[in-house]
Image (tube, rainbow, N blue to C red):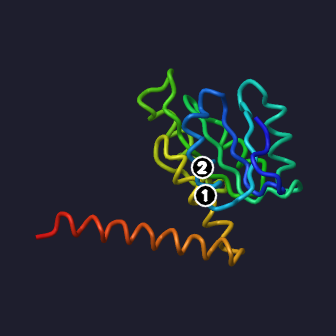
Amino acid sequence: MATKKTKKPVVSVIMGSDSDYPVMKDACDILDKFGIAYEVDIVSAHRTPGYMFDFALHAASRGIKVVIAGAGGAAHLPGMVASTTPLPVIGVPVKSSNSIDGWDSILSILQMPNGVPVATVALNAAKNAGILAVQIIGSSDANVLKKMVDYKNELRDQVTEKRKGVKR
């Protein structure tokens, strides 16, 4: 998997296995919607630990601002990346074929020790991880912030329209 935009990526979407991609694609779709340049890669904490450490150690120097890391099962990827990079890491617990209803992934990502935080979204909620990454980027980019304000207004307007259909 390669860079998804022609401009330099600022978000890295990584996952432990290609089987996680159908979930992680939702983060990519959000980043596309907001015009955020990103890269996609498979970085396995268990099968390619050397590559994972190299990725985490050099992500910031490559211009990455946020890492979105999806993993199933034991789900060590987000935490191990967070332990090695100064960047914010958003963990996406993925319900995998060997999962215990996703609880193993959720708890592996959520229960980080003090000093090594991982922002954790709901099970399979890569879309929310993408939105959070956009909000982080928007905190220092006025154009992205404006797009996020517009997006939130669209959500509000959608609910307002739906209320008209059910309110009596």
What residue is shown at x 36% (from left), y 66% (from top)?
158
Depth order, front residue of 75/95: 95
Q: Nearer the viewer, residue 83 or 152?
A: 152
> How far is the residue under mark 1 from the one under mark 2?
6 Å
Q: Which quadrant holds the C terminus?
A: bottom left
**Would you call the spot at circle 1 few (<14 residues within 10 Å), some (14-19), or many (20 or more)?**
few
Does residue 56 sit above or below 168 in this rendering? above
Percent from the top left, x then y, of residue 32?
65, 54
Say which residue label 2 marks. Answer: 29
Q: Is residue 36 left or right of residue 105?
A: right
Q: How crowded is mark 2: few (under 14 residues within 10 Å), some or many (20 or more)?
A: some
Residue 150 position within the rendered picture, expressed as x and y whole percent measured from the top left: 53, 73
- In the picture, the disc for residue 108 is none
Determine the image quadrant of residue 36: bottom right
Q: Residue 12: horizontal and vertical position, in percent?
A: 73, 49
Q: Position of residue 82 (x, y in %)?
A: 70, 49
Quarter occupied by residue 166: bottom left
How many labels, in total? 2
Residue at position x 44%, y 27% in the image: 100
Q: Dots 1 and 2: beta carbons under 8 Å?
A: yes
Q: Which residue carries the number 1 mark?
A: 33
Side of 114 where 44 appears, left or right: right
Q: Which element carries disc 2, helix, strand or loop?
A: helix
Please tell me whether residue 32 is drawn above or below residue 78 in the rendered image. below
Q: Residue at x 85, y 47 (%)?
A: 57
Q: Which of 116 and 160 is in front in this view?
A: 160
Circle 1: element type: helix
Residue 119 figure quarter: bottom right
Amino acid under label 1?
Lys
The amino acid pointed to by label 2 is: Asp
In this view, 29 is above or below 124? below
